Image (tube, helix red, strand yellow):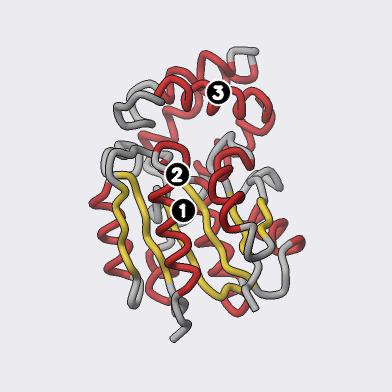
Amino acid sequence: MNEPLVLIPGMMCDARLFADQIFTLGATRPVLVCPPTGGETITDIAITILDYAPARFALAGLSLGGIIAMELYRKAPERVTRLALMDTNPFAETPQVSAAREPQIIGARAGRLEEVMREEMKPKYLAPGPNRIEILNLVMDMALGQGPEIFVKQSRALQRRMDQQSTLRKIKVPTLVLCGEFDELCPVKRHELMAELIHSAHLKVIKEAGHLPTLEQPVATTEALVEWLGWEIT
């Protein structure tokens, strides 16, 4: 029997981040998307997801979703059958990045969420490509749908997050570490380190993708997830 799959989107994203993956993987197993909206700390969000998740499940998260997935595994490793960490960050927030979030939070609260999001996405998000503008517009639509309160909560959660390198060393389930080759926000070298810390992890770099390979290169990303879901648990 194919285990259920829990997907956790990135910051200010919803299920549309995983549209291709849901369509393909949902044909063979239950797929549950859990947006990271259940608290102001990573731990609170993880606990909220655990309350709604199946008893045992495969878990995949992208960006903020990957950070929450690491915390979820730390809290309840016995419930996670396999893990996919995509375009994410196992480190605690640096003081510089934490400080940079404050004007963004002020701007979002002042009704300038669209301006804040466009400035944040401009240099960091996507690889060059013909669908870049279309994807950026989708990301903006998802963000505006979430609204400023969710932006502030997620920003605070990121500021307060803990270092998860010790968690990575304890992972004992089949693990995929995946990222886009042009991801400037969470670069390839960081994922190489993550894969080294996790026992028997597999690193997959998606060509011609940046921070959002699920949208930029959906077929290649879905293929990697299909393969990951087929791995035997050792």
**Which tag, 3 or 1, sits closer to the chain's start?**
3
Which residue sits at x=47%, y=56%?
Answer: 162
Indicate the amino acid at tag 3: Met
Q: Amino acid at mark 2?
A: Pro
Residue 88, placed above or below residue 76: above
Q: Which of the two marks, 3 or 2, is nearer to us in this view?
A: 2
Dot 1 amino acid type? Thr
Q: Which residue has dot 1 on it?
A: 222
- Residue 172 vs 105, above or below: the answer is below
Determine whether, in the image, residue 33 is placed left or right of residue 95: right
**Label pair 2/1, CB-CB below 8 angstroms:** yes
Where in the figure is residue 73, as x and y percent of width and height? 55, 68
Q: Is residue 84 left or right of residue 186?
A: right
Q: Earlier in the sequence, mark 3 or mark 2?
A: 3
The answer to the question of whether label 3 and label 1 lie on touching residues, with beta carbons closer than 8 A, is no
Q: Which residue is mark 3?
A: 140
Element type where label 2 sits in the image: helix
Look at the numbered disc 1 and give the secondary structure of its residue. Answer: helix
- Residue located 33% across and 39% down the image: 209
Question: With 57 as the anchor, is 91 left or right in this view?
Answer: left
Residue under the point 43% across and 24% down: 120
| Element type where label 3 sits in the image | helix
The crowd level at tag 2 (other Cα within 10 Å; few <14, some 14-19, many 20+) is: some
Q: Is residue 129 above or below residue 84?
A: above
Q: Residue 61: x and y, percent?
A: 52, 54
Name the outermost residue toward the bottom.
234
CA distance for labels 3 and 2 = 19 Å
Task: Give the quadrant of residue 126.
Answer: top left
Labels in figure, total: 3
Residue 21: x, y in percent? 54, 50
Instruction: Give the label on residue 218, or none.
Output: 2
